[in-house]
Amino acid sequence: MAWDGRKLKDLSKEKGISLTELAELLIVSRQTVNDWIRGQVPKGNHLIGLSQLLEISPRFFFPSEIPGNISVPLHRKRGVAKITGAMKQEAAHMAKQYEKLFNWAPDPGLVPVLRMDHRDRQNAIAMASKLRELSGIGSHKPMDYEHTFNLLSSLRIANIFRYFPKRLKGYVFYCKIHKHRVVFVNNDTNILDLIFPLLHETIHAIRDEEGNALSDPVEEDFCDAVANYTQFPEEYALLVYNTIKGRRKEVQINLLKNFSTENMHSMFGIMEQLKEINPVFDLEVGGANTNLKKQFPPIGDILFKEKDPRSYIHNLKALSPLFFEIVTRLIDNVTTRKTGEWLGLESEIDAKQAIVELRKIRDGIGS
């Protein structure tokens, strides 16, 4: 792997650190920093210092070639986090770990694609209606995480659960690996925060538009609108609005929290739909939403609820049947370590137990 010093200049700019400041913090000359940018590899202690200051893995500066059959648009970030070159590199590195898996998997063939001639509100609602029907959710209920994963399965999108590195500030990201549409899910994501970004990336997958949506704000806004209407049907938003309108602020917040608790969704998400009904309606729900999230787990805790790799395999089968199917086909042809990596299991003992359970399910042995 070759050192790419140009990344140092770009990353420093993203972090708001001038090259002169960088030199001072590392106690080297400005000329030394210039030499690094031109291609000279920093000494070990300087490389570690650079990585710590810029909050990036050292491998970021030694990029391995990402094959052309892997694409990582990385549309949706977390909160106010900006999408950076470092984040893209981390996402691409994670996707590359699954290159062989999807290369060996059966060709996905024809996959569902939904396109609209006009990216307007009417078409956003129409697309959302089709997606809700595919998910199997009731007509008036907001989407929950289980029906959202049902939707991905119906659309033949493989979802992979992993704990993201801190530098990859996202809940989920969509990519293509050997023609397979894949959505990576951060196990640290609270289930209330998960549904909207998961829907957003799913919509990018089925829109299958050419080009990078990051440079097309109209496409991003359209995907946001479809995700909102998919999560919250108009009937539900109207029910919430009619229930809380005209009441005192504190009563509105408590009622909104009750709706969110009962239906397992973020208070921020439903507020966006209430503003669609009445643009001047506004509630400060930050504190209430923070308290609400404490009642619900991250998706990783649901997957590993029993802290047993065998139980994890059954949960994985329920929430990610396509990925489960692909991995199960290949377990006899790869090492325990590689299977564990694909499953996000660090312990070889856990990986071995998981493989035993995969084989039992495949061969119809036991439950």
Image (spheres, grey):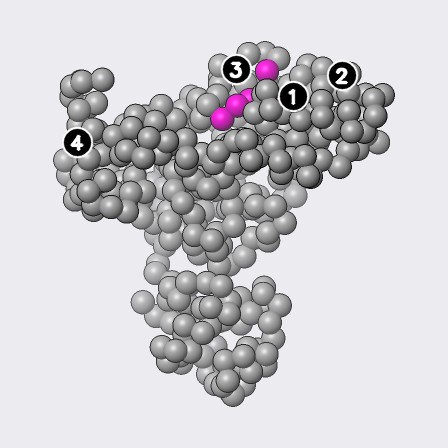
- Report how far apart the C-alphas of labels 2 and 3 lie in the structure: 23 Å
Q: Earlier in the sequence, mark 4 or mark 1?
A: 1
- Report how far apart the C-alphas of labels 2 and 1 lie in the structure: 10 Å
Q: Would you name the residue on which mark 1 appears?
A: 259
118 to 36, vertically: above or below: above
Q: Quadrant of the N terminus?
A: bottom left
Q: What is the secondary structure assignment of the residue under circle 3?
A: loop
Q: Would you name the residue on which mark 4 appears?
A: 356
Query: Residue 235 occupies which quadrant of the picture?
Result: top right
Residue 238 spot, x, y in % from top left:
73, 17
The residue drawn where x is 71% and y is 22% is: 255
Q: Earlier in the sequence, mark 2 or mark 1?
A: 2
- Report how far apart the C-alphas of labels 1 and 3 lie in the structure: 17 Å
Whether residue 158 appears in magenta in the rendering, the answer is no
Q: What is the secondary structure assignment of the residue under circle 1?
A: helix
Amino acid tagged 3? Ile
Amino acid tagged 2? Thr
The front one of 311 and 9 is 311
Q: Would you name the residue on which mark 3 appears?
A: 137
Q: Earlier in the sequence, mark 4 or mark 3?
A: 3
Residue range corresponding to the magenta coloring: 141-145
Residue 72 appears in the figure: yes
Left or right of residue 99, residue 173 in this image: right
Residue 309 spot, x, y in % from top left:
27, 34
Q: Would you name the residue on which mark 2 appears?
A: 243
The residue drawn where x is 67% and y is 17% is: 236
